[in-house]
Image (spheres, rainbow, N blue to C red):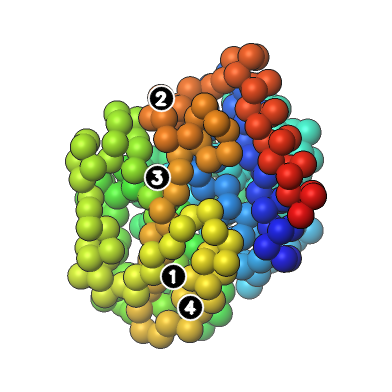
Amino acid sequence: MEVLELKKQANEIRKGIVTAVHSAKSGHPGGSLSAADLMTYLYFEEMNINPENPKMDNRDRFVLSKGHVAPALYSTLAHRGYFPVEDLTTLRKVGSYLQGHPDMKGTPGVDMSSGSLGQGISVAVGMALSAKLSGDDYRVYTLLGDGEIQEGQVWEAAMFAGFRKLDNLVVIVDNNNLQIDGQVDEVCSPYPIDEKFKAFNFHVINIDAHDFEEIKSAFDEARNVKDQPTVIIAKSIKGKGVSFMENQAKWHGSAPNDEQYKQAMEDLEKEGAALCQK
């Protein structure tokens, strides 16, 4: 897809995120919106996947380590054709297969149940090691929050991945600098993130999480790295695309009311119209 088409797709995914969280009256819109461009590129360009055969053996794997931003994953999967976009309004409803955190047993396209922060990257590392041991050529991607990397388990997994030279693993850090309690660098600073991963033998790439050309370049570069896992540290804006949510920690885990939902959708509709004129 061309950059313009990716931008249009990401905007539709953001609409799905806001709609799902509003319908549920709970959820995590801020981090979902900051990750939307990354998720769009992964599922529409980067990964070897097939919505018509979600469990094909040689598919690339994705683990949403920051599982609370499930709305981003669900909206992406829906728009990619894994299930109807209309089902996004069932988010967190009793009996829905779209629960508050990803469920690999009930949701098409979900490779790993996740939500307890710090654990997803460990599973992704295990998947990458499994591919190496089995001689398979699939790649493994995992998305972490910058607040999440305050968890010690993240660094145990990173140490193992670097030592085992898992060059089929790509870790992505959604670096929006906000977590539930405020700014990441004021709660428990993980900075400098790049130097920490370098110390664990990772190939490090820093990008703008909302620039598709930089996103493409980073994933292309990661494919050519040998004998090292890659980390892409993606500087992002929490709540990206919705004016009143951007860079506001309170939207980490709050749902918009009816009036706020209307304003959010107007923002996204306006962005979509502007993209169509380009």
Query: Can you tell which mark lies on residue 169?
Result: 1
Q: Is residue 8 placed above or below 90 in the rendered structure?
A: below
Structural distance between the alpha carbons of marks 3 and 4: 23 Å
**Residue 42 spot, x, y in % from top left:** 59, 61
What residue would you read off at disc 2? Answer: 250
Mark closer to the chain start, 2 or 4: 4
Residues packed near mark 1 inside 10 Å, few (<14), some (14 to 19) or many (20 plus): many
Which label lies toward us, 2 or 1?
2
Residue 133 in view in this figure: no
Structural distance between the alpha carbons of marks 3 and 1: 22 Å
Mark closer to the chain start, 1 or 4: 1
Structural distance between the alpha carbons of marks 1 and 4: 13 Å
Query: Can you tell which mark lies on residue 221?
Result: 4
Label pair 3/1, CB-CB below 8 angstroms: no
Direction from residue 16 to residue 30 in the image, left or right: left
Which label lies toward us, 3 or 1?
3
Mark closer to the chain start, 3 or 4: 3
Amino acid carrying mark 3 in the image: Asn
Amino acid carrying mark 2 in the image: Lys
Amino acid carrying mark 1 in the image: Leu
What residue would you read off at disc 3? Answer: 176
Mark closer to the chain start, 3 or 1: 1
